[in-house]
Amino acid sequence: MNRIALLLSMLLLIAAVYLSCGSTSATRVPPSANSELEDQLTVGFYNLENLFDTTDDASNQGDNEYLPSAAKHWTSARYQDKLAKLSTVISQIGNEVLPGGPALLGVCEVENKKVLEDLVAQPALSKSNYAIIHYDSPDGRGIDNALLYRKDLFTPTQSKTISLLLDQKRDDGSRKTTRDVLYVKGALLGDTIHYLVNHWPSRYGGEEKSRPGRAAAALLNRKIVDSIEATNKLADIIIAGDLNDDPNSPSLTKSLKAAGRRADAGVTGLYNPMLSLYNQGGGTLGYQHAWNLFDQIIVSEGLAKASKDWMFRNARIFRKDYLLQQSGSYKGFPFRTYVGSSYKEGYSDHLPVYAVLIRPF
């Protein structure tokens, strides 16, 4: 009996040690079913298509069309419906890897911080523990960039906006203004990462005429990347945003110098995985019944190459049937909130994009 009792005690001790080692800690993401040897999580970007509240901000003339009294009849009920829909989308982005939404999500076309507070408080996101980094932007339409992050996965240590100065003039002779680049540095489960949230100048007035603005935005991002890599050549850097250009556009290939092949990341310092998706017919928004892939995630050499910390695995477009028009002339393209002043009850005119990052245990 003593030997049996001793054996039972040893088995109980082994089980206790095993259970304590296998518990999930705050610094680890449970591995997915297809990987038992690495952390996995997602980071992403989503253009929220004019997420305005219904309150008139006298200092922001850009919100005038999104008021109950305006032609769009932007009411509280419509605002709440859009919040519910967007929060559902965000909670499902990359949930095959990380349930509840990406660890980091860059967003654009938001009026202010309040609309983001309303967004992350929605039932679909309330348990994901999202916090917000937002700064007001000088954009003429009154829309900003921001970063949502899950507080249990990311700890910001620095954030700021970096202004993009344009040489272009408005019709009245004043200098055009646009969205700032949002720069955030922090610890993603202990490892340092740099995140640049972008919304480059639009193609308003024509692609060729507006091209210099996007070239300037690309050069600004290149300058930021170079300054980081001058200190740490293999720093983990992500450029995410609505770039208003496709991956093969000159702003991406010549000004930003983002390589289309992972093997070339060591030459340019940047790798754009969206180019292969675009070449396969992938897109995030429709224009004249054709797809563009303006929403992109670009990674540094440090993320493109294998290392002991985070490494880029792949990029994906979050494309679900409910995010697409099910009928009409734009069937199969993004299900928008508005087309002109006509309310369509949709989500956004853009599809989200995300990337999977992995890290060895």
Image (spheres, rainbow, N blue to C red):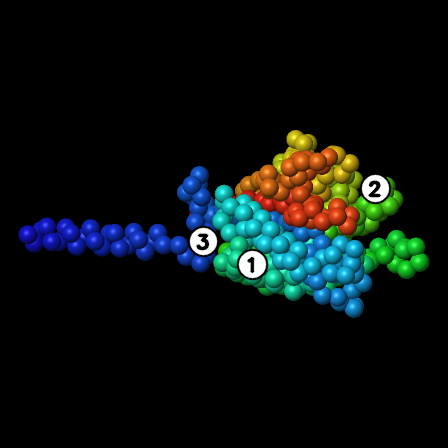
Q: Mark 2 sits on what residue?
A: 207
Q: Position of residue 276 (x, y in %)?
A: 65, 34
**Side (left or right) of 339 relative to 360:** right
Q: Mark 3 sits on what residue?
A: 28
Alpha-carbon span between mark 1 and mark 2: 37 Å
| Residue at the (62%, 42%) spot, across then down | 323
In the picture, residue 260 is in which quadrant?
top right
Residue situated in front as seen by the camera: 278 or 72: 72
Q: Position of residue 89 (x, y in %)?
A: 58, 48
Kindly tell me whether residue 311 is visible in this rendering.
no
Disc 2 is placed on an element classified as helix
Disc 1 is placed on an element classified as loop
Alpha-carbon span between mark 2 and mark 3: 45 Å
Q: Earlier in the sequence, mark 3 or mark 1?
A: 3
| Residue at the (75%, 67%) spot, across then down | 57
Q: Earlier in the sequence, mark 2 or mark 3?
A: 3
Question: Please, what is the three-letter code of the amino acid marked with disc 3?
Answer: Arg
**Side (left or right) of 174 relative to 144:** right
Question: Please, what is the three-letter code of the amino acid marked with disc 2?
Answer: Glu
| Residue at the (76%, 54%) spot, across then down | 72
Mark 1 vs mark 2, foreground winner is 1
Alpha-carbon span between mark 3 and mark 1: 26 Å
Question: Please, what is the three-letter code of the amino acid marked with disc 1?
Answer: Gln
Q: Which mark is residue 122?
A: 1
Tag 1: Cα neighbours inside 10 Å, few (<14), some, or many (≥20)? Answer: some
